[in-house]
């Protein structure tokens, strides 16, 4: 996809990324087989280096949209696979470029993917989601699409804080529910995204509270 750069090499040598790659090699991620009627999607956990060299994760707040089950949620870039996508890796990179302007093919390096995820509630459409992980240059510019209300970076050191993982109250179709959440500043992450972040930390050898 892209010639290696010294910057990405340095980030890939970070202990957390080294442990992630080792886990991916030793324990291949689970890929769920599903009927053709079940839609497939992919998200991207894009990591860049902070000024101190520590990795941080790109996250977005989805724009409010009527009829969208993930309207207003805190998430990672991603979306449904299109017929023209060769595979789910293409889906993850295409959706990330469309939603945030981050071009991993030009400015990054795809590392692999985590276990496939699917909704645990019948209120969501049947879908299989594959979380990919990539490294990107520190100076990438974020250009949010109309589907994205905000974009921000979360240090992996903040993700690894056990106190940030707790049980919180979220509203689902007007009903309050108690669910596992990751709390970062004013942002509450839950559902499929919370599960993807939990996986990321687990693959890095730092499973959060409740895992």
Image: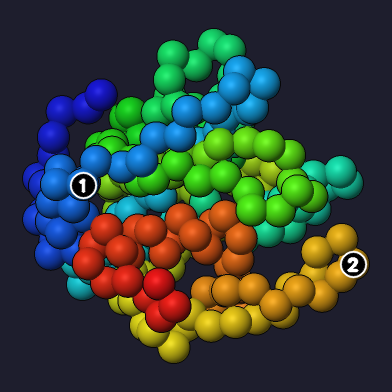
User: Does residue 67 appear to the left or right of 54 in the view shown?
Assistant: right
Q: Quadrant of the C terminus?
A: bottom left
Dot 1 or dot 2: first in sequence order is 1
Q: Residue 210's quadrant in the figure?
A: bottom left
Tally of numbered tags: 2
Q: Which mark is residue 62?
A: none
Relative to 60, residue 87 above or below: above
Q: Kindly report the distance in space between the C-alpha atoms of the residues bearing marks 1 and 2.
A: 40 Å
Q: In the image, which is nearer the foreground, mark 1 or mark 2?
A: 1
Q: Name the side, left or right, on which 93 lies relative to 151.
A: left
Q: Which residue is mark 1?
A: 27
Q: Is residue 11 visible?
A: no
When asked about the image quadrant of residue 14, the answer is: bottom left
Q: Which residue is at a point 21% across and 47% down the rendered structure image?
A: 27
> Residue 173 sits in which quadrant?
bottom right
The residue labelled by disc 2 is 174
Q: Residue at x 80, y 64 (%)?
A: 172
Describe the element under mark 1 as helix, strand or loop: loop
């Amino acid at each position: 996809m892209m010639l290696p750069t010294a910057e990405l090499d340095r980030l890939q040598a970070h202990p957390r990324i080294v442990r992630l790659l080792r886990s991916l090699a030793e324990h291949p991620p689970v890929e769920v087989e599903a009927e053709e009627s079940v839609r497939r999607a992919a998200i991207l956990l894009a990591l860049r280096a902070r000024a101190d060299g520590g990795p941080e994760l790109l996250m977005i707040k989805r724009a409010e949209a009527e009829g969208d089950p993930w309207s207003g949620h805190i998430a990672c870039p991603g979306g449904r696979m299109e017929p023209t996508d060769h595979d789910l890796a293409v889906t993850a990179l295409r959706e990330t470029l469309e939603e945030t302007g981050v071009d991993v093919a030009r400015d990054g390096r795809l590392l692999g993917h985590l276990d496939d995820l699917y909704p645990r509630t019948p209120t969501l459409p049947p879908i299989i989601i594959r979380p990919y992980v990539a490294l990107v240059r520190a100076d990438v510019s974020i250009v949010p699409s109309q589907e994205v209300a905000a974009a921000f970076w979360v240090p992996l050191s903040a993700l690894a804080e056990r106190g940030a993982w707790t049980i919180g109250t979220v509203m689902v179709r007007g009903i309050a529910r108690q669910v596992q959440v990751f709390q970062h500043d004013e942002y509450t992450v839950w559902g499929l995204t919370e599960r993807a972040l939990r996986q990321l930390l687990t693959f890095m050898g730092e499973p959060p509270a409740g895992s």
